[in-house]
Amino acid sequence: MKNLPIVLGILAIATAFPAWMRSAPVALGPSDLKGQLLARGGTEVEPARIASLRVVDWDDTAGAAKTFEVKKEGAAWIIPSHFGYPADGGTRVGRTAGGVLAVARGRLVTDRASDYEALGVIDPLDAANQDKKGRGKRVTLKDAGGAVLVDLIVGNAAPDGEGVTFVRDVEDTAVYTAKLTADLSTRFTDWVETGLLKLSKDDVRSVVISDYSLTETPDGQVGIDERGQTVFAHKAGDAEWTSEQTPAGKRVAKDVIEKSVTEASGLTLAGVRPFNLKWLQARGILPVPDPAWIAKPHALVLAVGNEKYALFGKEGRIDIIAKDGLRYSLVFGNPALGDDEDTDEGAGKKKDAPAKDGKDAKDAAKPADAQSRYMAIFVNYDASADEAAAKEADKKDGDKTKKPNGAERAAKAQARFGQYFYVVKDESFKSMRPALDKLFEVKPPEAPKPAADAGKPGEFTPVVGGPPAAAVPTPAP
């Protein structure tokens, strides 16, 4: 009987072992889990409990994991990695979370780690695993207290046409099939509302293209090369654009202006940056406090606290004026850095890297992504362009309808655009702000006028001073 306490002590240690070894995968009894929900504990989770959603994917080019996360802040969803920009919580977040919450395990495929690569269910965050291939996407849902609700590795689609995917819980060795509908993207633009102006091109009444470039000296002095400002307008229902600045012998290049308006009205973002004077200046959108610049005609004046600045972009500006009197000013800066590089206010001023040889030297000398460009948006109200307000002014007091005035509408729009500036595709920039020599085209030669009518069939013209000509008989019908 003296051996009994020793045996009991050994059993106690053996029983406690799995409880503290949290980091190792825990086998959950795969033969018993078919049909059980993939959520932790196998029970249904209320969508309202979800407070964060993280997706991790493997970037083969970088040879590293890429993480994207959205979090709930109050009633809204934000993206912490992108300066708290609002996520499309009503659709994208709900659709992704719903696609993994109420999904049941299908058939058991394997519980051997040696099969993970072929099935694509290696954890992308597993630093100890040296395999570059076979890494899946990891999706994690947590509640407000940080408790894990779902934590899955989503692998390859099953090849037998079942319409299912290989999945496993991060803490489970077993791999199952499951019917997942979630699109587990780590691209920023897949998680936000990308439309910017949300403007119908048919509502645009005029376009102002300001073509200039800025130079900035090392000591902070700014110079400007003003090449011109051109105004284009058209009336409702009129297909033609006009400009008082049309040169002699030319006409407005309608296709060029239409392309500019179409691009601006449907403009989409490719990235965001926080609206901050230092961030702006480092990226080619310069706030100039000089009173002489503030007094320039058509200067875009920005008030920050008690200070005023004239805001100029290194690559010009375009103004879109709509029929409701709202004037959208789009200011263009430098080519944009990628999201992973552009993480602090000074990043935009990064210059060429130390000299290297060959192709690396060329790549190092590229300070930005030539495929995108920085752009800021400002909204003001022009009462003279408000068609509805003009009609209301002509009505009797009893017939007038109460609507938010133009200044209020502009302030509401500016409140949205005043928190961030944007990254847009460079091709969008080039379409919206075409070069001055593209704005007008040579008029085609006028068609020759038809010759004067020499007479009607059956008639003749007498020859003065000679015998009358014979009549030409009218052809039979």
Image: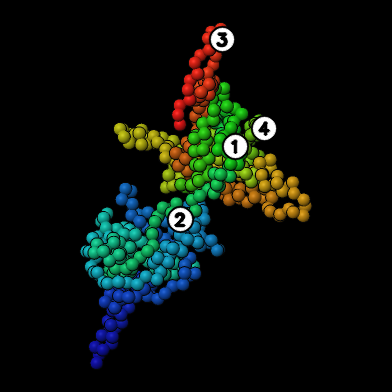
Identity, as a three-letter code, of the amino acid under mark 2:
Trp
Disc 3 residue type? Val
Label 4, label 1: how far apart the Cα atoms are: 29 Å
- Residue 176: image x %, image y %? 28, 69
Alpha carbon distance from label 3 to label 1 = 55 Å
Residue at disc 1, secondary structure: loop
Image quarter where the N terminus lies is bottom left
Please tell me the numbered disc located at residue 39.
none
Q: Is residue 291 above or below residue 53?
A: above
Q: Real-space Cα distance between discs 4 and 3?
A: 76 Å
Q: Are marks 3 and 1 in contact (CB under 8 Å)?
A: no
Place of residue 281 in the rendered image (x, y in percent of width and height, measured from the top left): 54, 39
The image shows residue 452, relative to residue 191, as above or below, that is: above
Q: Earlier in the sequence, mark 4 or mark 3?
A: 4
Residue underneath mark 3: 464
Residue located at (40% from left, 36% from top): 366
Q: Amino acid at mark 4?
A: Ala
**294 left or right of 354?**
right
Q: Is residue 150 left or right of residue 226?
A: left
At label 3, counting other C-alpha atoms closer than 10 Å, the crowd grade (few under 14, some 14-19, many 20 or more) is few
Q: Which residue is mark 2?
A: 191
Which type of secondary structure does the marked residue at label 4 adopt? loop
Position of the C terminus by quadrant: top left
Q: Residue at x 39, y 56 (%)?
A: 185
Q: Which mark is residue 295?
A: 4
Q: Quadrant of residue 159?
A: bottom left
The answer to whether the residues at label 4 and label 3 have Cβ atoms under 8 Å apart is no
